[in-house]
Amino acid sequence: MNPQFTAIPLEQQATTARARKALSIGLPRCNDPAEKRFPLTPEGVAMLTEQGYTVKLEQGAGTPIHYTDPHYSRAGALIVSRPEALKCDMVLHLAPMSTTDIAHIRRGAILFTLANISRLTKDSVRQLLLRNITTVAIDLIKDTSGNTPFADILAEIDGRAAISRAASLLADADHGKGILLGGIAGIVPCEVTVIGSGIAACATARSAIGAGAVVRMFDHNVYSLRSATRELGPGVIGSAMHPRSLATALSTADVVVYTGTTPPLSVNADTADTMKRGVIVFDLSDNSGNAFASLPVVNLATATTVDMSPTEPTRVCYINAGSSVPRTAAMAISNTFITLISQISACEGFANALKILHGLRNATLTYTGKTVNRQLAETHGERYVDINIFTTLS
């Protein structure tokens, strides 16, 4: 063999990769009686642990949605104390947190929660800022199409739950009217008045139509109303919110569901007095209970059986419909969380995610010790700083 072509063995460089720190996700128990929903199901935990995350669940945290600690531990979660769950890199807690709990959250951690801006205390906001905690309101997150995945799925659940609960209350032979919503030959069906035409309103109307009820839908926004009635078909009667037409519909309705309008609805005491005795009223708007201020409010997250079923026919406004079906809500939130966390992971860190995901940036309330949400700053007297300053300069 010609020595010119003699093969000489060479060292081959081994491919090396820097191991990334496994991020931890904390799931503390929610002690707020008005919030029964939970952010992750065992199935969601299993998907996250398979992706390399460490999930730490406070003992008994899944009880409100009827999942036990063994359900979560079999999915890969570590069952820990509350302080340990709060010390994770990311903490998932839907209700506003107390200052004591915030003090246990690791400095610089990320807190995923619901906006709850009016329910946050000034001291809680100050504590979040002092500990440099990044607070993200999941219901304000938008996707690339401008949709709000968390808020939309929760609104749909609220609408479905409202009709389900209304049907149960009407059918109660002892405390309700003992009637069905409709669908029986020869019997006039119940009337359901839906105010608003967004996702919650369409979900409400769709469930009511399916039960055989007569459905009327009102809204100021005629374009949104047109879109809703096209989607729902001839089973719903759409109308602009003329005062007289709305008053007539309210006086004959067996179920009234308000889902939010612009400007907001305000039904005075005189109009409320014209409504049927035993009418079932739901307020699914952000300012629950304000639309029907003269009616007593029953929060379905904390209500007892007596609260939900008055001993005599009366007019009651029910709020927090989604918390009456917390497990369904948990499954929906969990699915959406998996997508969100995967998107953040693909961006290789939260700071990069803020630069890339504009919808996540708009949902951030506090960041690096600054209040970056204008509404939060104005509500609690804090200085507002535009988050784009941080993402541009970093």
Image: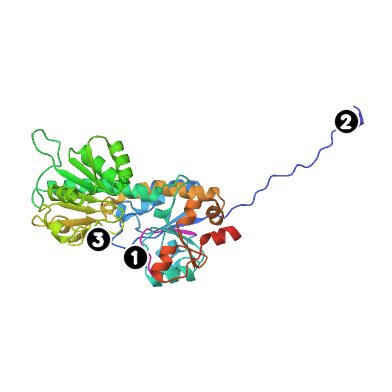
Residue beneath the point at 37% across and 69% down: 121
Check residue 207 for magenta coloring.
Answer: no
Judged from the image, the secondary structure of the residue bearing numbered disc 3 is loop
Image quadrant in which you'd find residue 373: bottom left
Q: Amino acid at mark 2?
A: Phe
Q: Give the residue at mark 1.
A: 119
- Name the residue nearer the viewer: 79 or 339: 339
Q: Give the residue at mark 2.
A: 5
- Tell us which disc is closer to us: 2 or 3: 3
Residue stretch rendered in magenta on the structure:
89-99
Q: Earlier in the sequence, mark 1 or mark 3?
A: 1
- Name the residue nearer the viewer: 131 or 45: 131
Q: Give the residue at mark 3.
A: 290
210 relative to 378 in the view: left or right: left
Q: Earlier in the sequence, mark 2 or mark 1?
A: 2
Residue 363 coordinates in the image, percent (x, y): 45, 56
User: Distance of mark 2 from mark 3, alpha carbons?
Assistant: 89 Å
Asked if the residue under mark 3 is in contact with the one under mark 2, i.e. CB atoms within 8 Å, the reply is no
| Image quadrant containing the N terminus | top right
Judged from the image, the secondary structure of the residue bearing numbered disc 2 is helix
